[in-house]
Amino acid sequence: MKRRSILKMLVLLVSLTALSMIIPLIIAVVMEERGMIRAFGISIGAVLVIALPVLFVSRKQPVQFNTADGCLLVFLTWVAACLQGALPFFFSGYVDRFADAAFESISGFTTTGISVFIDLDILPRSLIFWRAETHWLGGMGMVVLTVAILPLLGVGGFQLLKAESPGPDAERITPKIAGTAKFLWISYMALTGVQVLLLRLCGMSWFDAMVHAFSTLGTGGFSSRNESIAYYQSPAVEWVCTIFMLIGGYNYILIYRLLRGKFRDVLRNSESRAYVFIILISVVIISAALVPTGIPFLDAIRQAFFSMASILTTTGFSSVNINLWPPLAQGVLFILMFIGGCSGSTAGGVKIIRYVVLWKQAGNELRRIIYPKGVFTVRLDKKVGRKDVVYGVAGFVFLYFLLLGCTVLLVSASGLNLFSSVNVALITLGNIGQGLGLDNASAIVYGFPSGLKWALSFIMIAGRLELWTAFVLFSRDYWR
């Protein structure tokens, strides 16, 4: 029964990925890109031919599973969606190996943003759009989308959302989980529409505005230009992208509360206060480092805000060459690569809430030395936190840095220097997309052997799924 339920849901989820290719297919038709019409047509048709009979046969099959089943389904869904998303890249003829196509698709869906394409100018418009759309879909999550539009999930919906959503805990914002997912997607689409309009007013074409809005709110970083945001040489574009990158890296649960007028809840939120503090202190330090180099004060503020937001929210856009910045400014950005955005956001990384928990626990341990018989608890949002949250955070951070170290060794074994290997490891595990000291990250990845690309692809998926969902499947206790 469980196997049939998982198969049914897997087919449903992958079918949604196929249907999402209709828009780039339409673009290919309008732009008369015959090769891409064939590529998208095959990619959509192959999935639907398999999916429709399965859905018809299992239409009366009840869907029931627990959290453990949800972990398996989410992991399999991400793998299947990413592999299916690779088909247009592969059939387009712009990549020679399926490993390259899979890497590009996985980088897109996991909102990592590192690419195997060195020259974007030669790519068809429909393929450029599909790259950005994978960011947009992966940012909020295909699973959340399914929970929003398929109430047949019933009780299993929350198990899926818990396995999919980032952060140490998943929280409902409406009585029904389908209502929660619908709000997330409605707000996500509304914000996307607003950014598209603002970018159009700043001088972008409608196509470029949509591509960059998808990549910004998805915190992915794929652009339609080789120079990324630097191509436009527009302070207005940079400020719009900065604001929406910070929104993308913010907790959507708190956005919901802001819209409901619950400002006090947001002001009390420990992660929200830490997010604002990190933003402000980073901008101050970076700006202070840039001004002495001759950059005008207002330009230094703008560049500091943009680059800080790009790294902290793991988006990966670039407006200037940060490798030419002073070491102090680069040091701040390097530290931000270890942090990431808020829980409940589209950003990757360790997440700020986990550092808040560890900071408070470290303070408790210091007090315990002074008062050995005292009883101390971690308080989040002025409420006493559960001990299991502290244990879970500690376990996650340990696993994260252990996997980071293993990834560094794996990449360095290919012959890349140590600092670049650390950057590539941070880029893939933290889903960041932009690193320091890498003149052309795409060229570096393009030169990797296929085996290393597959390994880094798994790292990207594991990072996107908060590690536990992926690594629990390697436990013998799970299969027992």
Image (cartoon, rainbow, N blue to C red):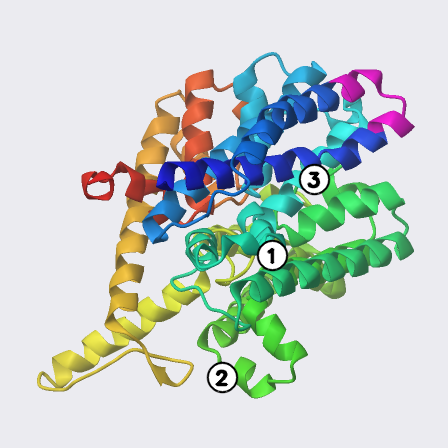
Whether residues under marks 2 and 1 lie with C-beta atoms below 8 angstroms apart, the answer is no
Question: What residue is rendered at 52% in x and 37% in y?
Answer: 437
The residue at which mark 3 appears reads as 132
The residue at which mark 1 appears reads as 148
The residue at which mark 2 appears reads as 268
Task: Identify whether 186 is placed above or below 456.
Answer: below
Say left or right for 407 vs 130: left
**Which dot, 3 or 1, sits closer to the camera?**
1
Among the 4 quarters of the image, the one containing residue 371: bottom left
Which mark sits nearer the N-terminus, 2 or 1?
Answer: 1
For the question of whether residue 51 can be seen, the reply is yes
**Type of residue at label 3?**
Ala
For the magenta stretch, what is the residue range? 28-38
Question: Mark 2 and mark 1: span between their CA atoms?
Answer: 29 Å
Question: What residue is rendered at 76% in x and 17% in y?
Answer: 38
Determine the residue located farthest toward the left in the rendered image.
Answer: 373
Which mark sits nearer the N-terminus, 2 or 3?
Answer: 3
Tell me the number on the disc at residue 164. none
Task: Identify whether 355 is placed above or below 209.
Answer: below
Task: Identify whether 244 is placed above or below 374.
Answer: above
Magenta residues, dominant SS class: helix
